[in-house]
Amino acid sequence: MTSFDLSLYLVLDPDLCRSHSMVETTMAAIAGGATIVQLRDKEAGTDGLVRAGRELMRAMEGTNVPLIVNDDIEAAIAIGAHGLHVGQDDLPSQIARDRLGPDKIIGLSIESEEVAQKVDRTIVDYVGIGPVFATPTKPDHKPAIGFDGLEKLVRMVGLPSVAIGGLKREHVLPALESGADGVAVVSAICGQPDPKQATAHIAETLKSARNRMK
């Protein structure tokens, strides 16, 4: 399977990326220390995702940073992406694994204890846990769980995990202290005047948080 590092997980938002394109934002973020990138665009449709994803794959070639597609398995296959991230209302993870094969990364959103108890660890490679805070980039999200909820779900799932939902640089330490392997960010990088610098600041904070926790 493609190796992956959840430390600094960039979720692309095409609306926020208007001042810098998604490709520009992605390459700047990778230069600043982003370790994994997710293409998420609920409005683009499969064809739009495929166009954007192929452009991203070309730009990211040689970086060793995986590209994950949100929700749309047809797009993920057509792009040749490194993996797929699905939510609770999306394609079942078993079907995703059957279609993608053993080498692709499959991520799953976890929002509650009920969902956490049902995760099949033989299928899913990592989980995105949240939302930690309410976030305008995903208006239909489930209720915020806070860091206490994050810690509880990390322990329950027992898989590599990334915290998501309204997270900024100042939330890195509490997210890691809650047991998450990394933080997923959207507006903390997308739409920032200097995406590379914004990413580098988060990467520095991750490094110092890990040193502090040793």
Image (cartoon, rainbow, N blue to C red):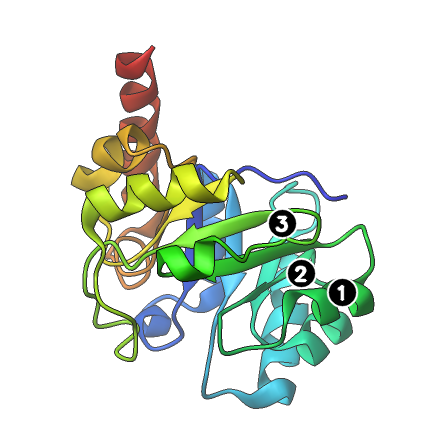
Q: Kindly identify which residue carries mark 3.
A: 66
**Marks 3 and 2, how far apart at CA:** 9 Å
In the image, which is nearer the foreground, mark 1 or mark 2? 1
Q: Is residue 6 visible?
A: yes
User: Mark 2 is on which residue type?
Assistant: Met
What x and y, as percent, mark residue 167?
24, 51
Residue 22 or residue 81, whichever sits in front: 81
User: Mark 1 is on which residue type?
Assistant: Gly
Which quarter of the rendered picture does the C terminus lie within?
top left
**Marks 1 and 3, how far apart at CA:** 11 Å
User: Mark 3 is on which residue type?
Assistant: Pro
Q: Are marks 3 and 2 in contact (CB under 8 Å)?
A: no
Task: Name the residue located 34 percent from the left edge and 20 percent from the top edge.
Answer: 210
Q: Kindly identify which residue carries mark 2.
A: 57
Which quarter of the rendered picture does the N terminus lie within?
top right
Question: Is label 3 in a helix, a strand or a loop?
Answer: loop
Task: Name the residue located 42 percent from the left edge and 45 percent from the top edge.
Answer: 162
Count of numbered badges drawn on the protein:
3
Q: Which disc number belongs to residue 80?
A: 1
What x and y, as percent, mark residue 19?
31, 70
Q: Is residue 182 visible?
A: no
Q: Are marks 1 and 2 in contact (CB under 8 Å)?
A: yes
Task: Name the residue located 44 percent from the left edge and 37 percent from the top edge.
Answer: 7
Nearer the N terminus, badge 3 or badge 2?
A: 2
